[in-house]
Image (cartoon, rainbow, N blue to C red):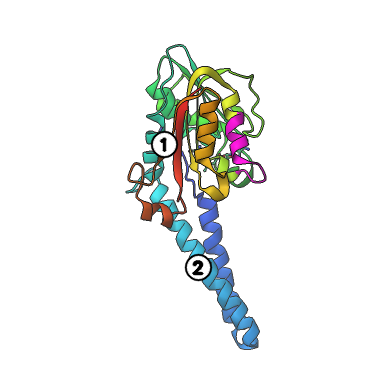
């Protein structure tokens, strides 16, 4: 059996956009002669929906694990390369989706355990599930993983219970919560001496001043904290990142 990590641009979403575009185009044809207002309304709706449907299709192709670019795999593997769990230790992947990063870390650290947690609700609920994570682990022949429900806003784990924490493209999805507070909540469950590798869209508008955050962690005793711009060719180029809506992709790494 082959793992099925699904796509960050979920197929039902892409299909839904194409269906909405078709409906708008049909309404345009029907109401075209009913008056200028109707023609403008449905014409504009068709064009806007067409743009988003084409863009989501391009995203789908770029992220596709079976596609040519395989960008999701590049990013997952690149993030997992920063995850080093001591033998017998335990790592946490926050917002694990279909388990791709959890499983990639478990493969790289066979003498450690990985835990993946997610809310498995909201926009991704039909494609990312706990069952899919478990099926993917089985398909990959990986047994040193487990998955459980857990919200990044208030993780269901004791303080300092993991040797490593990691995450990929999760916190930007969480609205109405300060992103630096979310990072601190993830770091709460990290043991003293443990390391972290957190990848997300860390632009100022979402995350505030991340250089100041790095300094704050330094003043709290964290070590080797740095921000790695992954759009400098590390995972993708700047132009590709902008086009795919992945501008400001950044890896925050360091040790508590
Ligand atoms: C773009 S997907 C990334 C999934 C996975 N990290 C990966 O790299 O394939 C975003 C994930 O964040 C999860 N998520 C959103 N809000 C969350 C929250 N408050 N706590 C935990 N996970 C959350 C979603 O359910 C979804 O699985």
Q: Secondary structure at mark 1?
A: helix
* Pointer 2 residue: 50
Residue at the (38%, 23%) spot, across then down: 108
Mark 2 residue crowding within 10 angstroms, few (<14) / some (14–19) / many (20+): many
Residue at the (33%, 48%) spot, across then down: 69
* Ligand 1 within 8 Å of the CB at mark 1: yes
Residue 99's spot in the image, x, y percent? 49, 32
Q: Is residue 224 above or below residue 25?
A: above
Judge whether residue 126 can be spotted in this image: no
Image quadrant where one finds the N terminus: top left
Give left or right: position of 16 versus 55. right
Q: In the depicted view, which residue is nearer to us: 247 or 130?
A: 247
User: How much space separates mark 2 and mark 1, taking CA atoms?
Assistant: 30 Å
Q: In the depicted view, which residue is nearer to us: 252 or 75?
A: 252
Split into quadrants, the picture shows ligand 1 in the one at top right
Residue 98's spot in the image, x, y percent? 51, 36
Of tags 2 and 1, the one toward the viewer is 1
Residue at the (64%, 33%) spot, across then down: 151
Q: Is residue 134 above or below residue 5?
A: above
Given contact means CB atoms under 8 Å apart, are the residues at marks 2 and 1 in contact? Answer: no
Q: Is residue 62 above or below residue 158?
A: below
Q: How many marks?
A: 2
Q: In the depicted view, which residue is nearer to us: 31 or 196?
A: 196
Residue 183 inside the magenta-drawn segment: yes
The magenta segment is 174-185
* Pointer 1 residue: 76
């Amino acid at each position: 059996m082959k793992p099925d990590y699904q796509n960050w641009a979920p197929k039902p979403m892409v299909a839904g956009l194409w269906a909405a575009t078709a409906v708008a185009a049909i309404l345009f044809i029907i109401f075209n002669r009913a008056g200028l207002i109707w023609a403008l309304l449905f014409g504009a709706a068709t064009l806007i929906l067409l743009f988003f449907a084409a863009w989501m299709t391009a995203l789908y192709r770029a992220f596709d694990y079976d596609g040519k670019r395989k960008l999701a795999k590049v990013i997952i593997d690149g993030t997992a390369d920063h995850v080093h769990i001591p033998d017998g230790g335990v790592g946490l992947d926050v917002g694990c989706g279909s388990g791709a990063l959890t499983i990639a870390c478990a493969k790289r650290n066979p003498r450690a355990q990985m835990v993946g947690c997610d809310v498995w609700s909201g926009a991704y609920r039909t494609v990312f599930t706990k069952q899919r994570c478990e099926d993917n682990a089985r398909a990959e022949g990986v047994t040193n993983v487990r998955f459980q429900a857990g919200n990044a806003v208030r993780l269901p784990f004791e303080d300092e219970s993991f040797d490593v924490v990691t995450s990929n493209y999760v916190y930007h999805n969480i609205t109405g919560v300060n992103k630096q507070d979310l990072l601190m909540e993830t770091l709460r469950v990290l043991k003293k001496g443990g390391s972290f590798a957190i990848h997300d869209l860390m632009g100022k508008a979402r995350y505030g001043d991340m250089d100041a955050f790095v300094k704050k962690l330094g003043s709290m005793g964290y070590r080797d904290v740095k921000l790695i711009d992954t759009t400098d060719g590390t995972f993708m180029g700047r132009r590709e990142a902008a086009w795919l809506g992945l501008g400001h992709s950044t890896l925050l790494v360091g040790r508590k």
